[in-house]
Amino acid sequence: MHLRRVLPLLLGMFALGFPAHAETTSLVGTRVVGPSNCIPFGGWGRDYMGFVYKNVPAFTLGVGDTIQFDLGAANNVDITMDIALATTTSSGSMQQDSAGFTTVVSSGTPASPRGDTTVGNYELSYTASSSFTFGGGGLIIRLKPTGSMASDGDCTQVLMASDATDSSGYFVGRFYSDSDGVYPWSGTDSLVIGVVKIVTGATTPWYADDDGDGYGDPDSISYASTAPSGHVADDSDCDDTNPRIYPGASERCNSVDDDCDGAVDEGVGSAYYADDDGDTYGDSSSVVLSCTAPSGYVTVSTDCDDTDASVHPGAAEYCNGINDDCDGSIDESPVDALTFYADSDSDLYGNVRYTRTGCTAPSGYVADATDCDDTRSTVYPGAPESCNGRDDDCDTTIDEDATDALTFYADADADTYGNVGSTIASC
């Protein structure tokens, strides 16, 4: 059978990606084409249409198996319908046997019910809600459209099919305008016959859940219409021996991928902070969670400048305009602080008895400590001496070389008249 003639199927299970364990019964013609003759659902105002086949091998359709159609035309309604199966009285007969029809799909609506004209795009996929066991021979597939599309008389909902030149040996005929759904059929011919692929048996994959966590082992698969005991539909467990390991589980520090995301111990553990300057204090804005300390990270997060190893909590403060010890204050109690002396008289010379330390002189203080009288601005080292009985220039001598000293003349003969050629200056 030629592959290109197998693909555009009328009825079947999931056109692509069949599970290897499923069983397939193919009723495919040797000439598969688009609908050259109209095969509408509910055409001419009748309720039933269907196809009759012969020489069909035995199969069992189970609950959960899928029946699929390929539409041959775009349409404007949802194709909702019942699907029933029956055995014929003999292979090649058009009449159902005494067991009658079994409805295997009730009011089914496929995922993409509107259709298109692409051959092999199986828009109509229905899931069986009842089982049907077929012993082989003649088979009838009967369709009963429901809802607004049942009165289609303009051939907008039509199927891919095989025409009358087909020589596969499967096709007997079709009926297309029957009102009661039983033989004899109204509107019968063999001009356009539906092609079928029926995939039955274990079509749904189920995965062993040995640890009972609700997630299955992708390497332990079984096929069945319903879930076998101890199996689930999910296949994402990465360790089916441990119920604490599954997608979405909480990560723990155990060198195991607890949440099955491909990473180990991510997002858990202790907080570690980047220590780029190597001073053993980390940057609080650069943090990772880890079960062990990454290289270049520490547990302390109190560094206020991770680019300078001399800046960290407890570091010595210096007069540098920097918060060296990360306490929020700058240049407090610096190790290189200077001593300043009170200058109460503002003569720029300080009193050695009154001091303050710091990086810069406080108001009213100077770096000099040599004032001998900080109550007079005229008294300081180097000040001019005056005849006032004080040590104006702080050299411990009083009134020497006073600027206002008087000139006295020698009176050798004690006559109270001095010698202009022999003088001294004195207060």
Image (cartoon, rainbow, N blue to C red):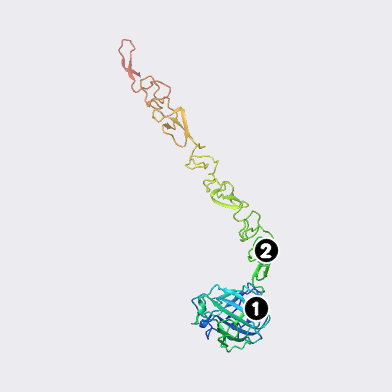
User: Which residue: 67% across, 63% down?
Assistant: 209
Mark 2 residue type: Asp
Tell me the quarter of the image containing the C terminus: top left
Residue topped by disc 1: 24
User: Which residue: 52% across, 82% down?
Assistant: 43
**Quadrant of res 373:** top left
**Quadrant of res 83:** bottom right
Q: Nearer the viewer, residue 299 or 65?
A: 65
Mark 1 residue type: Thr
Q: Secondary structure at mark 2?
A: loop
Q: Is residue 116 visible?
A: no
Q: Secondary structure at mark 1?
A: strand
Q: Is residue 289 visible?
A: yes
Task: Give the answer, above or below, for where 165 lies relative to 102.
Answer: below
Residue density around tag 1, few if under 14, some if 14–19, many if 20 or more, within 10 Å: some
Q: Position of residue 229 (x, y in %)?
A: 69, 65
Residue density around tag 2, few if under 14, some if 14–19, many if 20 or more, within 10 Å: many
Task: Give the answer, above or below, for where 273 lies relative to 345.
Answer: below
Q: Position of residue 187 (x, y in %)?
A: 55, 86
Q: Nearer the viewer, residue 238 or 127?
A: 127
The image shows a total of numbered marks equal to 2
Left or right of residue 214, residue 330 in this image: left
Distance between mark 1 and mark 2 Cα atoms: 28 Å
**Quadrant of res 88:** bottom right
Left or right of residue 157, residue 17 in this image: right
Q: Nearer the viewer, residue 30 or 282?
A: 30
Residue topped by disc 2: 209
Left or right of residue 23, residue 278 in this image: left
Q: Are marks 1 and 2 in contact (CB under 8 Å)?
A: no
